[in-house]
Image (cartoon, grey):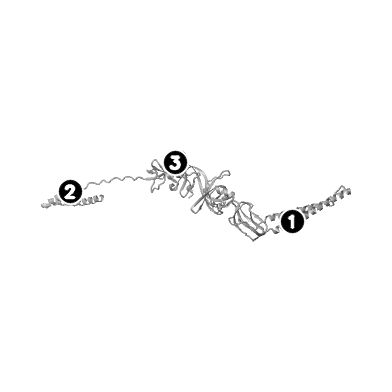
Amino acid sequence: MAARAFIICRVNSVIMKFTLCLIGLGGLMLGSEKKPVYFVIVLLLGSLIAWLIVTGKPEPIVLPTAQPREVVVDVSRFEIKRHYVWLKSQGLVTAQTSSVLSAQVAGRISKINDNFTVGGSFVAGEILLSLEDDDYRNVILNNEAELANAQQLLATERGKVKQAKREWRDLGDQASNDLFLREPQLVSASAAVAAAEANLQQARLNLSRTQVTAPFDGQLLAKHADLGQYVSQGLPLADIYSTSVAEVRLPITSDQRQFITLHSSSVNPVELFATYGERSFKWAAHIDRIEAAVDATSRQYYLVASLENPFQRLLDDSPKASELQSKSTNPPLAIGQYLTAKIEGDSIDRSVRIPRQALRQQDLLWLFVDGQLVTQPVTVLQVDRDFALVQLPASFHKQNDIAVITSDLLFAFEGMSLTPSFAEQQLSNELDSLSKSDSSLLSN
């Protein structure tokens, strides 16, 4: 329509100029001495055309005024409260107590326990392997004979001492002589008996050491000797570890360190996660200590989490294992297994947990206040893959919640008029329900 009106105006303009030219030409002709009739006709024709142009022009087109577009944004309300900071880390499972089982005496391995195999479980005092003990039994017999000889010599010497005392009394001399009374010989015989007893005791101890027993309840990690092998004193036989307590060494950065306070009387819970195929399992642990040194390469701190009885076999028929199995359905952990961890840190006042996309550049939030956009600076405490934990200024200490704009805008300015859409209200309610005992949203 607008293009048609433009064309009509252009045509009318050309005709108008042509008509004016005709009128001017007619006027010149009328002013000349010769006044032919056709000059009058031209003048009349030009006047007619001019009248038609003036009376036949189209009415002006009235275009409608463009109305401003309504800007609709998604707005979610989030509760302002104290939130716990959960620190994410990862580490490998280790045993709190591990040891190298060594031979205390030399000999050939004559018998091994069925549990003396990699992954085998055992209890404290259980005999894991036995060495040939014939030589040690012979030593005991020899030491018993030496002890009997020493005791016989001691008894003889005591008799000689009594006889010497009687002879000295018969002489009537009050002064005594230790050598005449055989005191040195008696001390030597007594020492010989004590030495023979010690040798016999050592021989019996060596005989008992031919049976290698477990020092604690545990499992065998690796073995270095087997049936029929001759082992010397001090030779490693196996690597073992205790199954009572496991530890996980968890590195954290200096930024994470500021959000956790450790006291000797406090317990900082830790949630450990492992995935077996499509199933995930969780173990409850606690921070036992923080290592004294910072890693020189990564400049990270190391927290040590401990958990009790994580290695028990589910197929164990012992009463202790059955009791532990009834308390937990988690599979047993393995040394060196990779676990992810969430560590409970300090609680932060005036904090809000929001979707990550709601956090704008320069640590800003877009708030919806009275139908307008208001930019609010915040302190970013923690940013996860999907969520962010921020702290509001002290001026918000009396507010219970805030309305956050979660939509992205190509152009935004302070005081911009907006129309809210609370399509994400359900999401905000679920997010606000995240508390000290519910942190599953951060495990992804």
Q: Which numbered mark, 1 or 2, is in the foreground of this view?
A: 1
Picture coordinates of residue 144, whole percent (x, y): 75, 55
Label 3: how many residues lie within 10 Å, few (<14), some (14-19) or many (20+)? some
Question: In this image, 196 relative to 125: left or right?
Answer: right
Residue type (three-letter) at the residue carrying disc 2: Leu
Pointer 2: what residue? Answer: 52
Picture coordinates of residue 209, whole percent (x, y): 67, 55
Residue type (three-letter) at the residue carrying disc 1: Asn
Nearest to N terminus: mark 2 or mark 3: 2
Residue type (three-letter) at the residue carrying disc 3: Asp
Residue toward you, 255 or 403: 403
Q: Secondary structure at mark 1?
A: helix
Q: Cα distance, mark 1 to mark 3?
A: 87 Å
Picture coordinates of residue 290, whole percent (x, y): 57, 48
Residue 4 in sight here: yes
Pointer 1: what residue? Answer: 143
Above or below: residue 411 compared with residue 206: above
Q: Cα distance, mark 2 to mark 3?
A: 73 Å
Picture coordinates of residue 42, whole percent (x, y): 14, 51
